Amino acid sequence: MRTRTRNLACLLAAGLVLGAAGCGGDAGGGGGGKDAASGKNAKVTITVGCQPPKSNKIERQEWDEDVAAFEKLHPDIDIESKDAFPCINPETFQAKLAGGTMEDVFYVYYTDVKKIIQNRQAADISPYVGTLKNYAHIRPDVMSVFKDGDKVYGVPRNTYSMGLVYNRKLFSQAGLNPDAPPKTWAEVREAAKKIAGLGGGVVGFGEYSAGNTGGWHFTASLYARGGDVVTPDGTKAAFNSAEGKAVLENLKQMRWTDNSMGTKQLHQWEDLMRLMGSGKLGMMIGAPDVVQAVNNDFRGKYEDYGVAAVPEAKASLAGGDGYMFHPKATPEKIRAGLLWLEYLKLTPGKGQFDYERGKRLNRPVGLPYPDFYAPGTPPGDQILADREKFATVPVEHFTSYVEASPNIPNKLEPPKAQELYALLDKPMSAVLTNRDANIDQLLAEAASKADQVLSKG
């Protein structure tokens, strides 16, 4: 869950149960096709969702600048931006589609894509997607989100994977090397004890355990240990396993044996952010954008934080968002939409990757996301070089994360994620509030309830 969309995550529990027709068409070409009378490209207008709201002045300014620049390059295409917030709302999605008001190019979370494809709610863009200049360089694990067999139904806008966010200032104060963050859970425990030993209300390691956030982080730690939340067919719980027990046992030991997690528990999203921003939290699981949220919303300073890979990670909980196309979009609209997305979201030096502009507007440049291009590819290398060249935050604080990430497979959230996260809050909260919590019993009970949720399809 990216920070800007995390507070919307519970909306996803409602799911998207929609019906619509499919779309076909011919391949190739540019924007609007040829006008029979003039021989010139006919004008095509596309509606596009998720324009930043007016309250977000800088991002709105960037979007509007990009629209003007794009339309100058492609005078046969008009962009009609939609700034409804949130960008996607399960409660209104069906009505928009049925009423013909869904954008031609609409915004989606990764967690919704599979259901949208299954219910034929988006156009098959396979005949056209190869025209994207850097399409071949997008990481296969990212593009697999938008694929069903050989068919493609969308492109990414953003992607993230979890890491270990830590307070470099507290590391130094505790006699730890901030340039050598923990690589194992044993090292995390030792570092957390030293940080907690600073006193003054400082917490060595923080964890969520309420409001579905506990289940979310349980999933992140479970994936890292090589476990899974559900079986491969998605019909049964799989977290009552050696890996699941190891996650809870580690937290129980840190909480009650090491006394490194503080006495206040039942944290939700803002609680750990606030602790981190106030300089009272040493470490937490989180994506790199946590650092941006802590700086922007919780009075932290970029220079005080770093991000490393999740210790001993065999996989990383990943997520993100992207764009799909209205199921009745014409071939001309699909081509035009792909040209727009290529400009805005997929081209180094343009749109979201225009880091020179970002520096000029005092935006955070240098954070390691989005990273959906394969390492060592021309677009990936240029993006990394531009981040360093125009950096406004210390890029070296994310070195260990950047170096480790290409070797850690990304793994998406499980089906019915929010419902399962709610169930998994209980074992997470229990081990952090009850010294005598029975881990075997907690996982067995949660798995039984999860099986019921999953059996409903």
Image: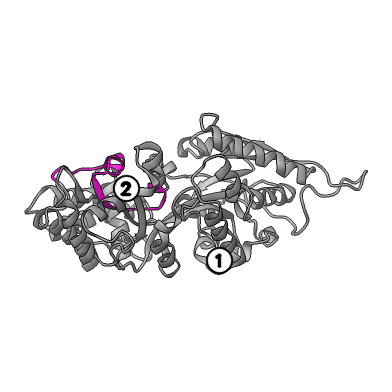
Q: Secondary structure at mark 1?
A: loop
Q: Secondary structure at mark 2?
A: helix
**Residue in the foreground of this view, choosing between 178 and 150:** 178
- In the image, residue 267 lies at what x, y percent? 23, 43
| Label 2 or label 1, whichever comes before in sequence order | 1
Residues under labels 2 and 1: Cα distance?
A: 28 Å
> Alpha-carbon neighbours of circle 2 within 10 Å: few (<14), some, or many (≥20)?
some
Q: Which mark is residue 149?
A: 1
Which residue is at the far top? 55
- In the image, residue 429 lies at what x, y percent? 18, 48
- At label 1, which amino acid type do we have? Gly
| Residue pointed to by mark 2 | 419
- At label 2, which amino acid type do we have? Glu
- Coloured how? one colour
In the image, which residues are magenta? 263-291
- Left or right of 130? Residue 96 is left
